[in-house]
Image (cartoon, rainbow, N blue to C red):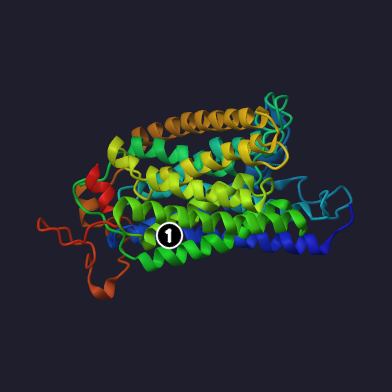
Amino acid sequence: MELDTGATAWMLMSASLVLLMTPGLALFYGGMTRSKSVLNMMLMSFGAMAVIAVVYVLWGWSMSYGTSVGGLFGNPLDHLGLAGAVYGADGSFLVDDYGVPAVVGIAFQVTFAIITTALISGAIADRTRFSTWMVFVALWVTMSYFPMAHMVWGGGLLSADGPFGGIAAPIDFAGGTVVHINAGVAALVLALVVGRRHGFGTVPMKPHSLPLTMLGAALLWFGWFGFNAGSAFTADGLAGLAWVNTTTAAAAAVLGWLATEKIRDGRATSLGAASGIVAGLVAITPAAGTLSPLGAVVLGAVAGWLCALAVGLKFRLGYDDSLDVVGVHLVGGLVGTVGIGFLATDTGLLYGGGADQLVVQIIIAVVAMVYAGAITAIIGLVLRAVMGWRVSEDVEVAGIDRSEHGESAYEALGAGRFSTETAAGAEAPAVRSTTEAKA
């Protein structure tokens, strides 16, 4: 295949946009935590970048796209250290079917592995040992993300070549199962394994900087164009459709979330807008190349509504998903993955395609949840026994940044300036206090 410099430039830019999403996530999550934990929260994202960028080169690409082992994962020895994945026998760069050097595809895919794993960290904010998290990152990306990428995109169990392909070709354009369901289930399991924060449900745990969160949401939205439009793998009409669908779904989700808040709580919030952006982006991720723009509006609005309701489940059910990873990413990922069965323009039920696409979308979502849940439970429980997940209660109350990193985000203003928790309730009520009060 002859090199296409335009497609190559597009994929390099897309890879860079997706990489930017992880620092954007650090800001998004960092603003949502209390000030005494913000550095730890942000370092969990940057730590994931550091670990996975190395691991992906060593065995991640091979496990994702190497020779299939039972349809579950690629042979990690096929391209160990990227051997045979970058250069051809004559020493020239390998080029894929889109005219893009294979090494550029590797660059694009590693950014997906990074952001997926970093998403999980929001569920265990304020209470987690950084060293345990770093070990978890290496284990989880190896045992859950790489196999899931192979199953869906590498010709494995959940691809068109797998056992369910006979019903209909499963659709996951940019990561509904691989990224969001995978990370969302892991977040739920890990929140249960690690346990609730001290004071959860009784002590207000207010986001310390909503401007940081809004900035993070803006960077995520910007980076998501690389995530979705880049998944067309070249600069063409499909990339343009994915771009338009990404924008409209996110915008519709903001409206759906804010309307839900207004009806339920009597007010629309900035945190709701930021969360709505992400909910819409999550939902459209698997569907960006298969829906019409009108379908994207419908999908985004439904995702904004359902995710706004779902974030309150943690108070009713008693699990401490600190930053609503489950409510946004698991629920949004399910909405998008299953919604394809209704709204895909070629095979969707509402477009006369019958129920086959809907059935196969439900199957791959369930398989992804079961696999990710089981793997995460094993890793989480082993690490709890061997290393321990929790900092001490005193450290958690005083501030994990000081203990884990010897730093404070707001040193000039005095340690703990914004995180004081007194019996009189020095913190203002949490932004989602109405939901919390009903719990």
Query: Which residue is farthest left?
Result: 424
Label 1, secondary structure: give it. Answer: helix
Q: Position of residue 41 (x, y in %)?
A: 38, 56
Residue 173 found in image quarter: top right
Q: Residue at x 59, y 28 (%)?
A: 363
One can see residue 213 in this view: yes
Closer-to-camera residue (248/117): 248
Q: What amino acid does circle 1 point to?
A: Ala
Residue 168 found in image quarter: top right
Q: Position of residue 2 (x, y in %)?
A: 89, 56
Closer-to-camera residue (114/439): 439
Q: Quadrant of the C terminus?
A: top left
As drawn, is 10 to the left or to the right of 40? right
Q: Residue at x 67, y 41 (%)?
A: 344
Tag 1 residue: 273
Q: Position of residue 428 (x, y in %)?
A: 21, 61
Q: Position of residue 431 (x, y in %)?
A: 29, 57
One can see residue 18 in this view: no
As drawn, is 213 to the left or to the right of 315? right
As drawn, is 291 to the left or to the right of 35? right
Vertical side of 69 occupied by 13: above or below: below
Q: Label 1: how many residues lie within 10 Å, few (<14), some (14-19) or many (20+)? A: many
Closer-to-camera residue (404/120): 120
Closer-to-camera residue (144/316): 316
Q: Residue at x 61, y 62 (%)?
A: 17
